[in-house]
Image (cartoon, grey):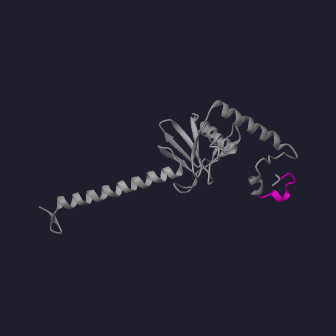
Amino acid sequence: MAQIAGQPLTGALFVLGLALLGVALWLALRARRGQQRSGLPPGRLVYADTGRWSAVARPYYSPRYNLTGKPDYLVQSDEGLAPVEVKHTAAPANGQAYDAHVMQLAAYCLLVEEAHGQAPRYGLIHYQDATLRIDYTPALQNRLLELLEQVRRGRGQAEMARSHREPARCRACGVRHACGAAALE
């Protein structure tokens, strides 16, 4: 019988197998924790724009809507494709995603639908302290298309009215010094 260091070969292979199984379980747990921290739903990661999981992704582009965008992640699950947008701020106190974030996610849903031929049922916005599911409904798609039309109409105007309803956002704006309509503090 073959031996390694005085032990039968089968015993050494058994110990090696247990060690490899332990390492595999540790790696699986570590991967699951990373997936939970990233806000990714269960499923297969098919697109990433973070540089962490793969090379920087190519943007989605729709000539029909003249729209370009890159979701942070795109996950294939039992429910279909789901874009995930990661924000590095806390979720709003009211538990509802910011409207601008919802429109950004809706744009990714539209782009995914154009590229893959099937609309996502939902997308996720992952804040530091919460992950919010946003259903991609016909009503949300219509809101997005109306917003895109407003942007296109505004491109031809000499001056566009800006929203200054969020004082904190105004304070953080890089062109606040040149804005005559900044929110009052």
**Residue at the image position 83 percent from the left and 53 percent from the top:** 184
Verify whether residue 176 appears in magenta. yes
- The residue drawn where x is 51% and y is 52% is 37
Q: Position of residue 147 (x, y in %)?
A: 74, 38
Task: Residue at the far top: name it.
Answer: 138
Q: Looking at the rendering, in which quadrant would you find the C terminus?
A: bottom right
Q: How many marks?
A: 0
x, y percent for residue 115: 60, 39
> Which residues, given as a range, are shown in magenta?
173-182
Residue 111 lies, in percent from the top left, at 63, 40
Quarter location, residue 61: top right
Q: On the rendered image, what quadrant is the N terminus found in?
A: bottom left
Left or right of residue 123, residue 3 in this image:
left
Q: Main secondary structure of the magenta part?
A: loop
**Percent x, y of residue 75:** 52, 43
Residue at position x 15%, y 68% in the image: 6
Left or right relative to 137: residue 78: left
